[in-house]
Amino acid sequence: MKKILALLLVFAMVFAMSACKPQIMDGDGMVNEAEPCTLNVFAAASMTETLTELQKVWNTLYEPDIELVFTFDSSGTLKTQIEEGAVCDVFISAAQKQMNQLDELGMVDVDNRVDLLENKCVLVVPDGNPAGITSYEDLGTDKLTMLALGGADVPVGQYSEEILTYMGLWDALNAEKKITFGSNVKAVVKTVSEMGADCGIVYGTDAAAAGLEVVAYPPEGSHSPIIYPAAVMAKTEYPEQARRFLAFLRTKDAKAVFEAAGFTVIE
């Protein structure tokens, strides 16, 4: 009798855990189980902290048997790697440009592409702000010795160039060799944190993650909207699992992590 009661208790616990597990619906509103696999997710460097945190949520609450392997770098670098044949199941870019270029090559599953997040650009300074930079206007003065930016193939660098061009500062800063370029936004953050530059332009989420002081926001309308598209790749070997991960990124659990990091979730 005791053995029977113990078995009933175990079954009850398993049922309760299953009932509490969040569910991901497919396009028909049905819940389907996905086969175990490993998904290769290429994502913009600015998503390092949030996706690392979401990996725990995914494997704990949603899909313990679907492993996520992340590759973080600039969206331009990741796009090139995908073009050259790197195995990628889901791509999350920090700009539409790189995703659109892959789309034009037929490498994106257009039915499983979404605009996921929005970010913002900010002007940051190292601890103590030795140069006394307090505004974008200061970048055109003798206060500035060196400005850290993302490179031309890096979305944060492209947004930065738009801002500085809008303000009439881009040509002069280049002519005076007052810009040092980083390979991705994390490289820019590191340069500013280690006082390799007087200031830098990075995403608000990266500034918060690194504890950098934000001294200014760009003028309204000075750059393109900073939209992060996410998509399943057309040649993925695991389309169902990849679609489930994309759907997971739009759940309330994922939304909470994104918003805590400073992203705006696009509904």
Image (spheres, grey):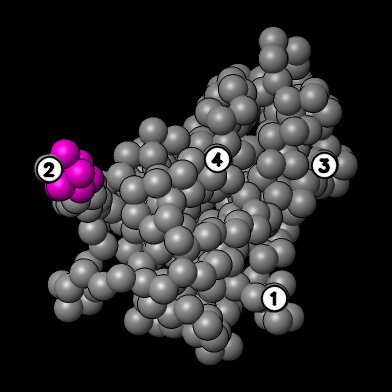
Of labels 2 and 3, earlier in sequence is 2
Real-space CA distance between mark 1 and mark 3, rounded to the nearest whole angstrom: 29 Å
Our reading of the magenta stretch's main secondary structure is: helix
Q: Is residue 253 left or right of residue 98?
A: left
Q: Closest to the observer: 136 or 20?
A: 20
Please say whether residue 6 is one of the residues in the magenta stretch.
yes
Q: Nearer the viewer, mark 4 or mark 3?
A: 4
**Range drawn in magenta:** 2-10
Of labels 4 and 2, earlier in sequence is 2
Real-space CA distance between mark 4 and mark 3, rounded to the nearest whole angstrom: 25 Å
Real-space CA distance between mark 4 and mark 2, rounded to the nearest whole angstrom: 51 Å
Q: Is residue 21 above or below residue 128?
A: below
Q: Residue at x 54, y 44 (%)?
A: 52
Q: Closest to the observer: 260 or 58?
A: 58
Residue 49: mark:
4
- Look at label 4 and name its amino acid: Glu
Q: Closest to the observer: 132 or 192?
A: 192
Q: Residue at x 12, y 43 (%)?
A: 1
Of labels 1 and 3, earlier in sequence is 1
Q: Residues within 10 Å of mark 4 (few under 14, many from 20)?
A: some
Residue identified by numbered label 3: 180
Q: Is residue 224 left or right of residue 149?
A: left
Of labels 2 and 1, earlier in sequence is 2
- Look at label 3 and name its amino acid: Thr
Residue identified by numbered label 2: 1
Q: Residue at x 51, y 37 (%)?
A: 205
Residue 86: mark:
1
**CB within 8 Å, label 2 to label 3:** no
